Image (cartoon, rainbow, N blue to C red):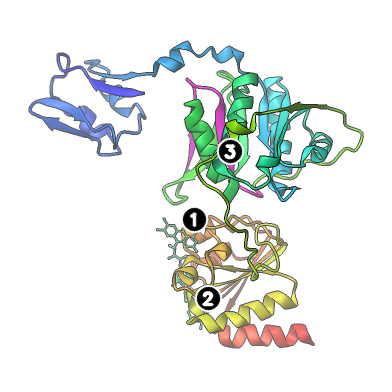
Amino acid sequence: MAIKVLNEKCVGCKLCVSSCAQGAITMTGKKAFIDPVKCNYCGACIDACKKFKAILIEIDRKAATQDLALYKGIWIYAEQRHGEIASVVYELLNEGRKLAGQLNEELCAVLIGSNVTAKANELIMHGADKVYVIDSNCLGQFNDESYAKAMVSLVEEYKPNIILTGATAIGRSFIPKVAVMLKTGLTADCTQLDIDDYTKLLLQTRPAFGGNLMATITCPSFRPQMATVRHKVFKKAVKDPNRKGLIITKNIMEDCLIARTRLVEFIKEEEATVNLSEADIIVSGGRGLGEAKNFALIRELAQLINGAVGASRAAVDAGWIPYSHQVGQTGKTVCPKLYIAVGISGSIQHMAGMQSSENIIAINKDPQAPIFEIATYGIVGDLFEVVPALIAKIKK
Ligand SMILES: Cc1cc2nc3c(=O)[nH]c(=O)nc-3n(C[C@H](O)[C@H](O)[C@H](O)COP(=O)(O)OP(=O)(O)OC[C@H]3O[C@@H](n4cnc5c(N)ncnc54)[C@H](O)[C@@H]3O)c2cc1C
């Protein structure tokens, strides 16, 4: 895509300058100049320049030649690690089924890995009409480059309309590569999906500006329409053991999967006794803990109630606990039955990752802390008194 100022039509009125939220337009001489690096092609300047028609967005030649009508079906990337399907996949199958119904198109899953074919039936039982499988020895360990190549080969052959992937470490790592290779758009971290009744485009909604507003994004000119979706924003599909579907196994030449990187070693994180994203109970600690050793209190409470340990970014940045425990906008999104926030103020970035928890207990000595606004129960007090008291009571 390219954006252009038609100098012969530009009258130097500066309406476009004030319309641009990105600050991408300046005046050089008496003509507008658009910085292509800052421009996000939102089209606000084109609206502002309606009278003079001096700004033009040119769509890539690929869009003009791509026959969008050929692209059919909703695809869910069936992320797996060591043969285990990620639970977000079942959430996407549930939402994908709804979208497929709205578009009257098929719901398909894509399974890539080594010795994974046996898992295809599980995807069918959770709602997939078809499962495309690429099962190859050289795909045993996840590698974003090889997996992207495998995925692209399927997309080029079968031309899906929509591809949905979990916004997990794996999804975030390889699906942008797929989008770039296919020259299409990708909306990351969606929390809501829908189909526009009139255009039939995928409406991809995600938090923007630190969660202060929700932006709905469409991809009108390119296919497939691609989105990553946050874990736990949709309910899991219900398993139907009687469901039948088609499994399509594709071979790919090993040479085609060669990557420039290789996995040297896989080290399992020792700390993560309970997976944060899957946990029903999370106890999180923040800056209020004061120092690393005080996380022992959080761990003890979490262990007693079979919970996972979470943290605010302040605690992670201070080096008190590894990043994998961070909850929030730039950490994990969680939706447990019970979230206990200890010494966490409740910044919008933290709340973006935990506010949909079923029950929230906040422990904070400041009664004005924003976390109390979303807490189901609030305990105003010193965590060094409240948490040991809770631990003692639970032990009893
Ligand atoms: C782009 C961006 C992304 C971000 N992403 C994230 C993210 O993913 N996750 C995240 O958490 N943050 C994120 N942040 C940081 C966020 O803005 C806050 O700085 C952070 O969440 C604050 O962490 P905190 O609540 O632990 O610390 P603070 O805000 O300092 O709060 C500490 C709280 O502890 C209480 N306290 C202190 N002592 C005690 C005591 N003895 N007993 C009880 N209470 C006590 C205080 O009253 C206070 O409310 C992000 C910021 C930006 C700009």
- The structure residue drawn at horizontal position 60% and vertical position 38%, both measured from the top left corner, is 147
Residue 281's quadrant in the figure? Answer: bottom right
- The structure residue drawn at horizontal position 54% and vertical position 40%, both measured from the top left corner, is 259
| Disc 3: which residue | 146
Q: Amino acid at mark 1?
A: Thr
Q: Tag on residue 330?
A: 1
Name the secondary structure under disc 2.
loop
Q: Position of residue 362 (x, y in %)?
A: 59, 71
Q: Amino acid at mark 2?
A: Gly
The segment highlighted magenta reads 214-232
Question: Is the C-beta of the residue carrying label 1 under 8 Å from the nearest atom of ligand 1?
Answer: yes
Residue 267 on the magenta span: no
Left or right, residue 306 beside residue 52: right
Reading the chain from its start, which is encountered first: label 3 or label 2? 3
| Disc 2: which residue | 343
Compared to 373, does 118 lie above or below?
A: above
Which class describes the residues within 10 Å of circle 1: few (<14), some (14-19), or many (20+)?
some
Name the secondary structure under disc 1.
loop
Mark 1 → mark 2, Cα distance in angstroms? 19 Å
